[in-house]
Image: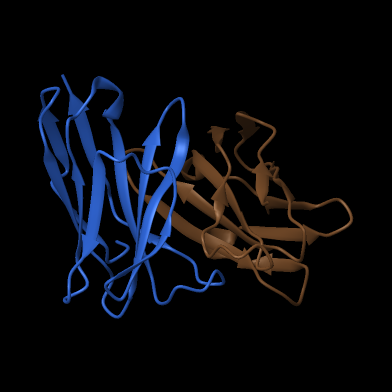
Chain colours: A blue, B brown
Amino acid sequence: DSGVTQTPKHLITATGQRVTLRCSPRSGDLSVYWYQQSLDQGLQFLIQYYNGEERAKGNILERFSAQQFPDLHSELNLSSLELGDSALYFCASSVASGGIYEQYFGPGTRLTVT
Amino acid sequence: AQSVAQPEDQVNVAEGNPLTVKCTYSVSGNPYLFWYVQYPNRGLQFLLKYITGDNLVKGSYGFEAEFNKSQTSFHLKKPSALVSDSALYFCAVRDPSGGSYIPTFGRGTSLIVHP
């Protein structure tokens, strides 16, 4: 158990809908990362927050947004969902933002868009 | 720019034999290198990292990796494979001179250990 929690574990929704994925980092970790994992694209970095502020942006679509709250939990919002958004979404956390720190991953949310 | 390659999609090894999962990288400076493992239906789990110092890094579950700057490689090794080591392995690299705090992950190598 990494100490990172994600809810829900599974999500099935229809095209055009909006969903929210939730992540709680390990106790004491200030940095949260979101990743998308699919068979064809591999593990893609989406966005990073550090202590409530956006720190880095990756291949995140404009239909997707995220935030980190004062209690350090984070939410990833996906809207106008398309079939191609079906994937595993992982949240990870690290103690700080520097690149020397390893990341601890949650169990993921499996999103299926029908 | 930083990049990482895992040249083998799949590695097969018999239980009890040594295993190697390959990783090569490209950075402009000195790299930070990481290995993660993903078991089925689980998130990635940190195994080990190289930041500086001794080129041989020891990690969890008996795994180790050797940083080779001349060959730009960071291969993951274990002297004696277990069936329970069967999983997806990811190498990641970060170039500290590149301005980004985010590591780049390889596409993963599926390790299958046969009884």
- Which of A79/A101 is in front? A79
Q: Residue furthest right?
A: B70
Query: Quick one: quadrant of the C terminus of chain A?
Result: top left
Question: Residue at 25% of width from left, 38% of height from top?
Answer: A63
Q: Quadrant of residue A82?
A: top left
Q: Residue furthest front?
A: A62
Q: Quadrant of residue A2?
A: bottom left
Image coords of residue B33 (percent x, y): 64, 60
Question: Horizontally, is A77 left or right of A96 in the view?
Answer: left
- Which of A2/A57 is in front? A57
Q: In this picture, is B87 found above or below A100?
A: above
- Which of A6/A114 is in front? A114
Question: Horizontally, is A81 left or right of B93 in the view?
Answer: left
- Which of B38/B63 is in front? B38
Question: Residue at 43% of width from left, 63% of height from top?
Answer: A103
Q: In this picture, is A11 found above or below B66?
A: above
Question: Horizontally, is A15 left or right of B89 in the view?
Answer: left
Query: Quick one: quadrant of the N terminus of chain A?
Result: bottom left
Question: Residue at 30% of width from left, 80% of height from top?
Answer: A28
Image coords of residue B35 (percent x, y): 57, 55
Image coords of residue B13 (percent x, y): 64, 33
Question: Residue at 60% of width from left, 29% of height from top?
Answer: B10
Total labels drawn: 0
Image coords of residue B11 (percent x, y): 63, 32
